[in-house]
Image: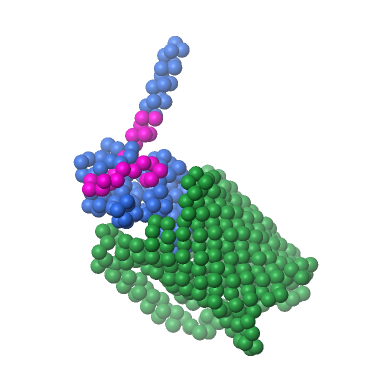
Chain colours: A blue, B green
Amino acid sequence: MKRLIFGLLVTIVWSANATYAGDFAVIVNKANPTAADKAAVAKMYTGDKKSWEDGSAIATVDLPEDNAVRSAFSTEVLGKSVANVKAFWAQLIFSGKGLPPKVLASDDDVKKFVSGNKGAIGYVKASAVDDSVKVVAK
Amino acid sequence: MAIRFSGNSFGEEIMGKSARRSSLRIVLGVFAAMAAASASSAADFDAFDLHGYGTQTYAQTNGNAYIDADQKGTWDNNILALVGTVALGDKTKLWAQLETSSLEATRFSWFFLDFQLTDDSTVHVGRVKFPLGVYNETIDAKFLQQSSLEPAVYQQAADFVHDAYTGVGYDHVQHLGDAGKITWQIYGGNAYDTDPPVASRDRRIYGARVTYATPIDGLRFLLSGYRTQVQILATDSLINETRWIASVDYVNSDWDLKSEYGGHKFGSIDSDAYYVQVGRTFATRWTVFGRYDSVIMDKSQTSSDSFSQKILVAGLNFKVRSNVSLRVENQFNRGYALPVASGEVQQGLGKHNWNLLIVGLHFIF
């Protein structure tokens, strides 16, 4: 009985972790040779890193703030809630220091934008990834 | 734009209502032209961005009517600002903030070109808000603040800060790895004030701000200041003037803690101001906040109510939506240094203990 309960607990924890970790995928244009880890992606989404290695501008895009994938990305990659990230960007906008990522309505819009712009980076639901884009982090 | 005092009539005298409407049309046309110009930009993505903020505030005081209050001690202040940017290339942006309010004429609070030299270095040229302390650059975006009336160190009557400078500024971020990062900002030029003094002129402003963002997420320390020479027109004499602010700021998901200490020296007159402010958010929408504020307009007269003011602020903020908030606060005052400094209350004739109740609606977009 104890083994059964323990097994169930392990299954629940493993499933939860697998679901959370697989919720989204960070994608770039297929012609972009860059590999990016979570820390680098976080820097791009907080304005600390503005250029790719070749000097071209990074164009970040977000999903709408009530989107569950955005919430997961914000928590896991940026370490903050969506509301806190919005507050962070509001300070930068109204002091003339920086602009937030563009917001696109859906995974399809993000994929279309990323596949059409060499400097773009975005994130989508992991199951939405197709061969029009390249995954750099999950 | 801090809450304005006497001198609001100055703006109204030089620009009547019809002229303000005309200027607003012109400026909206400028923004439209900026948007049209961005449409022909070679950028891969949208090159024109528009954001803004607004505030509607009502205040009632039971003594020392200032901030342009009427004889019953009431005043309301409406502010609307638009912040537009146009990307002129991958590394160059044009920024402009257009602001209008019930107390002042419509104007560009700031308007500058931003050149990104590297990921960590930027040059600004134009009219730029002074990088002073935590609040000066966003002083009129009340949604971003705990309180509807800014700490004394930022109020116009205290004269610790200017609105903006017209000149050149350079920012550089120094990464320290696991130890955080330091942002160095230096600038020089001339002061820009929406309500400039008539008897003097500021010359040759130069200043800096250093911000240390610690490895503790949300905790940073700032030290900022600037120096200028003030030319007294009547005597053609020059007086050195120095302002500085030391700040500590901690913001995480539920807490917002700030404390600043500022000094101002104008010739032989020394002033200082400080505050400690705490905000705690509950259930993501409700924020309780409090602040203790102190200003001494002349350190040689600290015992006088005309030169000293202590303020205890207690308030509640409710987020109606993620970008709209309702706020109510009461400010318990001892002394009336700011009303005297604004010229609206005579020395020695103010009310020692007085309250200021403020209700505000604030938003950003």
Residue depicted at 41% across the width and 79% down the height: B23
Residue B181 percent coordinates (x, y):
50, 51
Asked if A11 appears above or below B244 in the picture, the reply is above
Residue B47 percent coordinates (x, y):
31, 63
Residue depicted at 74% across the width and 68% down the height: B299
Q: Is residue A38 rendered magenta in the image?
A: yes
Residue A104 percent coordinates (x, y):
31, 51
Residue located farthest toward the right when viewing the structure as drawn: B303
Residue B56 percent coordinates (x, y):
52, 65
Asked if B153 appears above or below B70 in the picture, the reply is above
Residue depicted at 38% across the width and 50% down the height: A44
Task: Return the residue nearer the eye: A26 or A64.
Answer: A26
Side of B360 where A102 appears, left or right = left
Side of B234 where B194 appears, left or right = left
* Residue B25 found in image quarter: bottom left
Q: Is residue B105 visible?
A: yes
Residue depicted at 48% across the width and 74% down the height: B166
Asked if B249 appears above or below B207 in the picture, the reply is above
Counting the numbered discs, the total is 0
Q: Quick one: quadrant of the C terminus of chain B? A: bottom left
Task: Return the residue nearer the eye: A90 or B243.
Answer: B243
Task: Return the residue nearer the eye: A77 or B100.
Answer: A77
Side of B227 where B21 appears, left or right = left
Q: Is residue B53 rendered magenta in the image?
A: no
Side of A113 where A76 appears, left or right = right
Residue located farthest toward the left when viewing the structure as drawn: A131
Q: Is residue A74 visible?
A: no
Residue located farthest toward the top when viewing the structure as drawn: A1
Read off the magenta span.
A17-41
* Residue A97 found in image quarter: bottom left
